Amino acid sequence: FPVTIKVATLSNPTAATETDLFTAAAVAAGGSIFVVNRNGLARTINVRVTNGSNTLQSQIVSNYSLGADDTLRVPGPINIDSGEKIRVTSSGADVDFIASYIEVS
C-alpha cells in the first residue's frame, strides 16, 4: 500500500465559522493536530470529523478554552475514511490549526 505523509495548515479561519482543515483523499491516520492561539485572549475551539456532507461523525475537541498565547496538541491517531473531513472552529480569527497525517491508498 502506498503511504503519503501530509501536513495541512489553516491560519486565521473566519471566527465562529466551521472550516475544513483537510479532506482525506484516501484512508488517513492523523499523527497530531496543533492549535495555536496568537491572541492575548482565550479562544474557544472545536475539532470534528465529518463526512463529505459535513454531518458530524465524531467530536475530537469540544468547546475547549485555549488560553491566551497558548498551544494545544491533540494527540493521534485520528483515523478517518476517504472523503471524510477534519473541520475546525475558533471563536476568533487569530488561531492556527496544523495537522500531520498519512494517507494510505
Image (cartoon, rainbow, N blue to C red):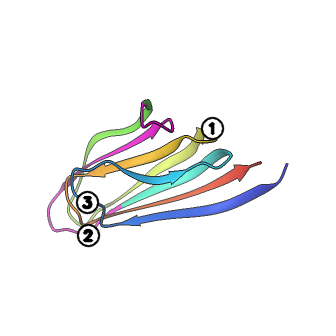
Q: Residue furthest left?
A: 41
Pointers 3 and 1 in contact (CB under 8 A)? no
Does the segment drawn in magenta span residue 43? yes
Pointers 2 and 3 in contact (CB under 8 A)? no
Give the mark toward the camera: 2 or 3: 3
- Determine whether 56 is above or below 75 in the image: above
Label 3: how many Cα within 10 Å (few below 14, some 14–19, many 20+): some
Who comes first in sequence, dot 2 or dot 1? 2
Instruction: Please name the residue shown 51% across and 39% down the image.
Output: 52
Q: Look at mark 3 in the image and give the residue it sits on.
A: 14
Instruction: Tell me the element at label 1.
Output: loop
Label 2: how many Cα within 10 Å (few below 14, some 14–19, many 20+): some
- Determine whether 17 is above or below 48 in the image: below
Q: Look at mark 1 in the image and give the residue it sits on.
A: 81
Label 3, label 1: how far apart the Cα atoms are: 26 Å
Kind of residue at disc 1: Asp
Who comes first in sequence, dot 2 or dot 3? 3
Who comes first in sequence, dot 3 or dot 1? 3
Instruction: Tell me the element at label 2.
Output: loop
Query: Which residue occupies the foreground of this view, 43 or 17?
Result: 17
Label 1: how many Cα within 10 Å (few below 14, some 14–19, many 20+): some
Q: What segment carries the magenta color?
A: 36-55
Q: Look at mark 2 in the image and give the residue it sits on.
A: 38
Q: Residue furthest right?
A: 1
Q: Quadrant of residue 34?
A: bottom left
Instruction: Please name the residue shown 59% across and 49% down the image.
Output: 30
Relative side of 27 to 55, left or right: right
Label 2, label 1: how far apart the Cα atoms are: 31 Å
Relative side of 53 to 40, left or right: right
